[in-house]
Image (tube, rainbow, N blue to C red):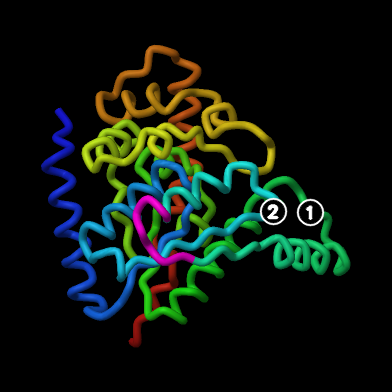
Amino acid sequence: MFNAGKVKNELIEWIRGYFEQNGKDCNAVVGISGGKDSSLTAALCVQALGKDRVYGVLMPQGEQHDIDYSKELVSHLGIKHFNINIKNSVDALLASIKESGPSLNRQATINIPARIRMTTLYAVSAVVNGRVANTCNLSEDWVGYATKYGDGAGDFSPLSRLTVTEVKALGRELGLPSKFIEKVPEDGLSGLSDEENLGFTYAVLDKYIREGICEDADIKEKIDRLQKTNEHKLALMPYYNYTVN
């Protein structure tokens, strides 16, 4: 049984411990989408460090239809924030790549904004003496639903061992408004939700992760295949282990 109260207290202490060891005077920098993961991560950092040591970074790509969620979240938490539109950066890079010859595919088009957002977070981090929070959860990581060196990067990761179901429970424990906890995650490109892109719900995935139960054989096969295919995203970079004879 998931004990949200216990986990909340442990996570707050864990974040404090991380900053104690990795920059006593540093600030937490969190990319804000207004969804459950970034909202919960920012709220935990506020609890651990105080709102004056947390910076939210809003990173729309042009016009973002749900940007109000992000604005309301930083206002709700009372944290300092920057609104940095990445459209010009994305467009310039895409144009440069096209001009040089390669034909961009869907995968490249999806991953480039995520990696530019991470570049933006680290730029802000350098300015405010920060540490960048990774906001991925276990469910997303399990099936590789994150961009390597994009939203899959960061300096510390509070939620990476918690499923979507557990993240929502923790959000309720922290008293976050339900609109942030229940906001439907989407990729921002195809107009589809994460679950529509994956082909199964997070509830089904979470049950398989925690209980090993998946009643649909086809979905089970897909989850296993996605996990195997995306293992490299969570592994340390392979290196040639040269030894001096």
Q: Amino acid at mark 1?
A: Leu
Q: Which mark is residue 9?
A: none
Q: Residues within 10 Å of mark 2 (few under 14, many from 20)?
A: few
Three-letter amino acid code at disc 2?
Ala
- Residue at the far bottom: name it: 244
**Mark 1 touching mark 2, by CB under 8 A?**
yes
Residue name at image x 25 percent, y 24 percent = 211
Residue 82: x and y, percent?
Answer: 51, 66
What span is colored magenta in the figure? 75-81
Q: Position of residue 187 (x, y in %)?
A: 60, 41
Foreground pick, 63 / 161? 63
Along the line of sight, the residue nearer the viewer: 195 or 183: 183
Distance, label 1 to label 2, CA atoms, is: 6 Å
Q: Which residue is mark 1?
A: 104
Magenta span includes 107: no
Q: How many marks?
A: 2
Question: Residue 94's quadrant in the figure?
Answer: bottom right
For the C terminus, the quadrant is bottom left
The residue under the point 42% across, 54% down is 75
**Within 10 Å of the Cα at label 1, are there few (<14), some (14-19), or many (20+) other Cα atoms?**
few
Residue beneath label 2, please? Answer: 108
Label 2 element class: helix
